[in-house]
Image (tube, rainbow, N blue to C red):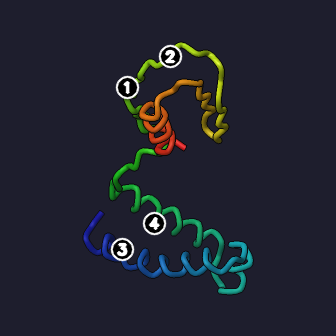
Amino acid sequence: MDEITKVKIQFRMEQWMPLIKECQDSGMSVKSWCRQNNVTESAYYYWLKQIRRKACALQLPVVQPESQKPVEFAKLQVETGTSRTGVAVIIHLPCATVEVKEGTSQKTLEAVLLALKSLC
């Protein structure tokens, strides 16, 4: 492709970018917007495709979705107290359920709650 053609395409693309944005921001369907603005749908979609291709060619940085990031767990130091087995408190959270047994140390309970705070 010669230099004049490249400049021409870039010029046309710069003309179409605000038109496409205007259409998308209008809340109208593409068909209605094109009819109202005397633009053919085929031209609209052609330039939309060209603009998207150009954006992809810029090799924008890929952002890793939150769900694919590795989960890190806090290391807890569990202190053993008396050997009672009765449950004193049950805490239901959206992401977990915690059963606090009688005799659980305050330090252990605080560590568990801090770990849950960062997860929930």
Say which label, 3 or 1, has the lower sequence index.
Answer: 3
Query: Disc 3 or 4, which lies upstream in sequence?
Result: 3
- Residue 67, horizontal then vertical, whole percent: 50, 40
Tell me if mark 4 has few (under 14), some (14-19) or many (20+) residues whose alpha carbon lies within 10 angstroms of its own.
Answer: some
Q: Name the residue under label 1.
A: 77
Residue corresponding to mark 2: 82
Please say if the residues under marks 3 and 2 sit with CB atoms less than 8 Å apart. Answer: no
The answer to whether 26 appears left or right of 18 in the picture is right
Q: Name the residue under label 3.
A: 10
Dot 2 or dot 1: first in sequence order is: 1
Residue type for callout 4: Ile
Q: In this view, does 19 lie above or below 5?
A: below
How far apart are labels 3 and 1 at the CA level?
62 Å
Residue shown at 62%/68% (left/top)? 42
Q: Mark 4 points at which residue?
A: 51
**Quadrant in the picture for the N terminus:** bottom left
Residue 107 lies in quadrant: top left
- Name the residue at 37% across, 28% down: 75
Q: Which residue is drawn at 50% across and 45% down?
A: 117
What amino acid is found at the position of numbered circle 2 in the picture?
Answer: Thr
| CA–CA distance in space, label 3 to label 2 | 76 Å
Nearest the eye: 80 or 19 = 80
Asked which secondary structure carries label 4, the reply is helix
